[in-house]
Image (cartoon, helix red, strand yellow):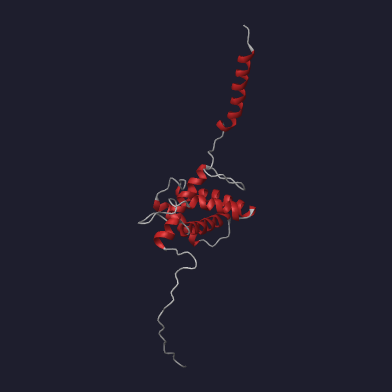
Amino acid sequence: MAVDRRSAIKQLLFVSAGFAILPSCLQKTTRSSIAIKNFSIDADQEKILAELTDTIIPPTSTPGAKSLGAPLFTVVMLDDCYTKDEQKRWVKGLKAFEEACKDMNGLGFVQCNTAQRNALVKSLEESKEDNALNYFYRTTKRETIHAYTTSKYFLTNVDIYELVPGRYKGAVPYKPQARKLS
């Protein structure tokens, strides 16, 4: 059987493409939805973060933190504004958070119901320890509140934002007040 040059090149291209794609097919974890450069989390950890932000600021008559993009904001802030040591401590705390949830409830945080999630968050609120778990929770809470209070929804519907310098009030009536002498 004679093999011509074209079919040999085609087969070589197919085999090399297969070897190029193979490593991505063998990965167990899924990738995060956002590209970060200084640390890494997978899609499962991103889901945990999303559910935690929604537990911190849940949806009511207003949207919750998850729907306003707080999880991605938190990851970007950590990637851009925190030191390498703080990032490592946060990732270590994220893993410890999931383990603490499994120890407390027997389930991962994503699988827990609202009452179980709130119980875990309440226990972290009351904890005074200085460990990676509490660092993760407090940092995530701070960045979630930051993301929520600087979101477009919050600044246009809840706390109406006025651009600097704001309105000029040139004629404001002056009412002198009597002062008590002591």
Q: Residue placed at 42% from the left, 48% from the top?
A: 112
Residue furthest left as drawn: 61
Task: Give the image quarter of residue 82.
Answer: bottom right
Q: Residue 122, image x and y in percent?
A: 45, 59
Q: In the picture provided, is 66 more to the left or to the right than 34?
A: left
Q: Nearer the viewer, residue 182 or 102?
A: 182
Viewer-closest of 29 and 168: 168
Q: At which x and y percent is residue 60?
A: 36, 56
In the rendered image, residue 164, in percent from the top left (x then y), is placed at 49, 66
Quarter of the image for residue 161 reads: bottom left
Quadrant into which the N terminus falls: top right
Q: Is residue 110 left or right of residue 130?
A: left
**Residue at 58% over, 55% down:** 132
Looking at this view, name the residue that lies furthest to the front: 170
Number of marks in the image?
0
Pick the front one: 54 or 115: 54
Residue 81 drawn at (x, y percent): 60, 55
Left or right position of 100 against 84: left
